[in-house]
Amino acid sequence: MEVKGKVVIVTGASSGIGEATAREFGKEGAKVVLASRRVDKLQTLAEEINKMGTEALVVQADLSKLEDIQKLVAETLAKFNRIDILVNNAGFGRLDWLENLDPVKDIQAQIDVNVMGVIQTTRQVLPVMIKQRSGSIINMCSMAGLVATPTYTIYAASKHAVHGFSEALRREVKPWGIDVSLIYPGGVVTEFTQHAGIKRKTNAKTPNFMLLTAEQVAQAVVKLVHKPRRMWIIPWLWGVSVFMNRFFPGLVDNTTINRFTIPEREDELKKM
């Protein structure tokens, strides 16, 4: 698909990957719809995109609310009369042991935004794309959607759900000329870590040489519009972890438990 002149909705566009993705589409001449709860940041980004010689529309939307999603789609159609590309990027993580997660603020909220937000936004956009007989839907997944690790229980569950949803959807909508792609970034330098509440005694983290910038992920998203593929793991080295997890799950279990779970929970285990 040629990006120039196309109408793109980017959710979670106020920071990180969403912001970088919206900017990247703007550079290619797309008309960009910016959706997020933080409207002040969206306005600043919209001004920047408008200066590129294209158009940006700001829509304040909480993706956990169906009425906000419906408003997002309605305002997009009122302004541009079509929707060519949907980037389901909005999402967040709360990383801790399951018993420590708040049932509402941490567990339910992650499912509402990360899963239901993706499903409901896609559901509202889909009839438009079916009528056009064209479209591109790109769902932001995560390595957690392929390899689940301790403290990622709910986040991994949400991303596994997005994986399954996208796989089924791709097989439903292809006859209408609609492509569905999944992107699985590893560690990315964004606000995610600040908001996730990560507390680790072992200081386990993604090696610096495998860390991505938001701009690198954004460029990959735009490439998926030009040349769709079912799934894209970035950087490619994470594919080794996926292979090991699939074919040697016992080894991955033992390594993870002995090198991460037990050292992290050593004090709690001593109390038992």
Image (spheres, rainbow, N blue to C red):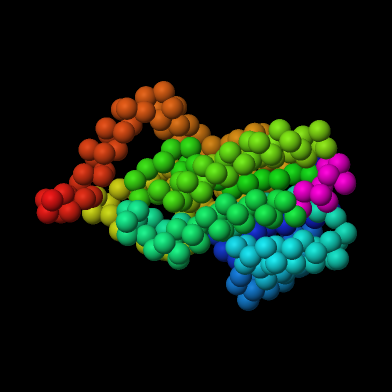
Residue 20, picture quadrant: bottom right
> Visible in this render: residue 54?
no
Q: Measured from the top left, where is residue 122 in percent x and y?
A: 70, 51
Which quadrant of the rendered structure holds the N terminus? top right
Q: Is residue 74 above or below residue 248?
A: below
| Number of disc labels | 0
The verdict on residue 130 being magenta is yes
Residue at image position (57%, 63%) is: 15
In the figure, is residue 58 to the left or right of 20? right
* Residue lying farthest to the top in this orientation: 247
**Residue situated in front as seen by the camera: 233 or 47:** 233
In the figure, is residue 154 to the left or right of 64? left
Residue at image position (67%, 45%) is: 138
Q: Main secondary structure of the magenta part?
A: helix
Q: Is residue 105 above or below residue 160?
A: below
Residue at image position (28%, 54%) is: 200
Q: In the image, which residues are magenta?
A: 125-134
**Residue situated in front as seen by the camera: 214 or 135:** 135
In the figure, is residue 1 to the left or right of 152? right
> Visible in this render: residue 218?
yes
* Residue lying farthest to the bottom in this orientation: 40
Residue 59, picture quadrant: bottom right
Residue at image position (39%, 63%) is: 102
**Residue situated in front as seen by the camera: 23 or 174:** 174
Q: Measured from the top left, where is residue 58 in percent x and y?
A: 72, 69
Residue 220, picture quadrant: top right
Q: Measured from the top left, where is residue 190 in percent x and y?
A: 49, 58
The verdict on residue 66 being magenta is no
**Residue situated in front as seen by the camera: 106 or 198:** 106
Q: Measured from the top left, where is residue 64 in percent x and y?
A: 60, 63
